[in-house]
Amino acid sequence: MTQSLSGQWGLSSSQLEQLDYNISLNMGWNRFRNQGPWSVYWTHTANARAQYTYRKRWVLGSDYSWTYFGGLDQSFNASIHLLNISLAAKVLPNRLGEFRISIFDVLGQNRSVNRIINEVYLEDSRNTALGQFVMLTFTYNFRNFGRPPRDVPADSPHPMGMPQGMPPGHGDPSRPWGTWR
């Protein structure tokens, strides 16, 4: 038999054009019993993410996560801190491109703890996840993807403003390549 209780709290803001942040807290309490006495364990997670934009071109970002596992076997009780940071530069006209360098797991603590409970046994396991690494990315933003061109009325019966019929350059449908001679 397992009983669980959890709660979550969060705060987000992007009121300022330059600063965007998010803070959250998750708390979980679990109680279970196989054939012996009740056992209790809990998990707490706190997350914070912030992003600061300077002169609409430079973006400094960071996210932090703290996870605590308690009530497990002494060797499995853990407090794990993860910190990722990034710096991005907006490039190209209208800032449609972005180069970003990110460092993941700055503190070198990326690992997980897992508990499996069933009628027969209880198993705690610990895994080392992907370790610290650096990543360089380029992102391009297709802003008008899927929208009709601006000079075509929205209620136009012809998609993308093209007239119905054969595409330009095709005179005879039975000879589509005939115009290339």
Image (cartoon, rainbow, N blue to C red):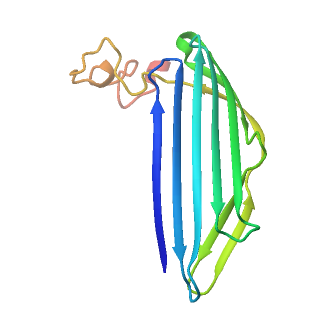
Can residue 136 be seen at all in this image of the molecule? yes
The residue lying toward the viewer, choosing from 12 and 145, is: 12
Determine which quarter of the picture holds residue 98.
top right
The residue lying toward the viewer, choosing from 56 and 1, is: 1
How many callouts does the rendering have?
0
Vertical order, 167 against 129 (above or below): above
Instruction: Tell me the residue at 37%/32% (across/down).
Output: 174
The residue lying toward the viewer, choosing from 39 and 15, is: 39
Instruction: Tell me the residue at 46%/55% (across/down).
Output: 7
Percent x, y for residue 155? Answer: 20, 22
Percent x, y for residue 28? Answer: 52, 60
Instruction: Tell me the residue at 73%/64% (across/down).
Output: 126
Q: Is residue 29 left or right of residue 74?
A: left
Q: Residue furthest bottom?
A: 35
The residue lying toward the viewer, choosing from 131 and 163, is: 131
Determine which quarter of the picture holds residue 149.
top left
Can residue 162 be seen at all in this image of the molecule? no
Vertical order, 25 against 103 (above or below): below
Percent x, y for residue 27? Answer: 52, 55
Percent x, y for residue 59? Answer: 62, 21
Instruction: Tell me the residue at 60%/27% (across/down).
Output: 139
